[in-house]
Image: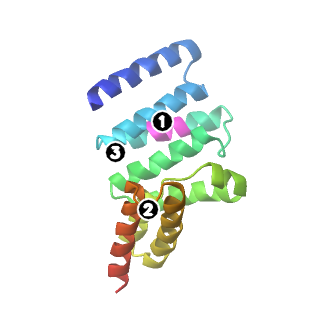
Amino acid sequence: NYFDAELTLREALKSALSERGANDSLAQAIVSAMAALLNDSGRFKESEAVLNNSLRILEGIGVSPEAATYLLARSRLTDALVGQSRWKDALANHQASLDVLSGDPGLGKRFRMNSVSAIMALLHTGQFDEADSLLREKTSEAQQWLGVDHLNTAEFLALQAVVRAKQG
């Protein structure tokens, strides 16, 4: 349950902070996991605050925006912003991640962004063609990597139906 998971993460974070301090990438990875838990439990504002602080610390200690810890925190921040219906902020944050990924094609293949939040933001801002394009790409990837019967593939296919209905 979320309560037990949060307690476990808080204990791990407490240990990492006492042994390594806040300016440590391991501590910030735990913070990112905590933010994912907060997102999953609907505590989006709290998650956003935690992630913005984590991103500032990661930047301050010289962690590259291409680092997995940094990209994961950004991805989770997009989720938190979507959870608050802050569509434009979510898209701006997602685009910043894409900009980093576009500089290194290999990085883009190694780190797959969770694009469902970005797709939802595109839909809510009326950018149906962009949502459709991203959905086609993500559906193809899901079918290739996860198979046609996987839940994520089905989710992308269902979102494609929503986009097509919005497009008319």
Q: Residue at x 36, y 36 (%)?
A: 37
In terms of depth relative to the viewer, which is nearer, 146 or 67?
A: 146
In terms of depth relative to the viewer, which is nearer, 69 or 23?
A: 69
Marks 3 & 1, CB-CB < 8 Å contact: no
User: Label 1 amino acid?
Assistant: Ser
Residue 67 percent coordinates (x, y): 65, 41
Give the vertical position of 92 relative to 163 (above or below): above
Report the residue marked by disc 3.
44
Query: What element does badge 1 sit on?
Result: helix
Give the vertical position of 86 relative to 131 (above or below): above
What span is in magenta?
A: 50-55
Report the residue marked by disc 2.
148
Among the two numbered marks 2 and 1 on one chain, the one whose residue lies closer to the N terminus: 1
Q: Is residue 22 visible?
A: yes
Residue 14 percent coordinates (x, y): 45, 17
Report the residue marked by disc 1.
32
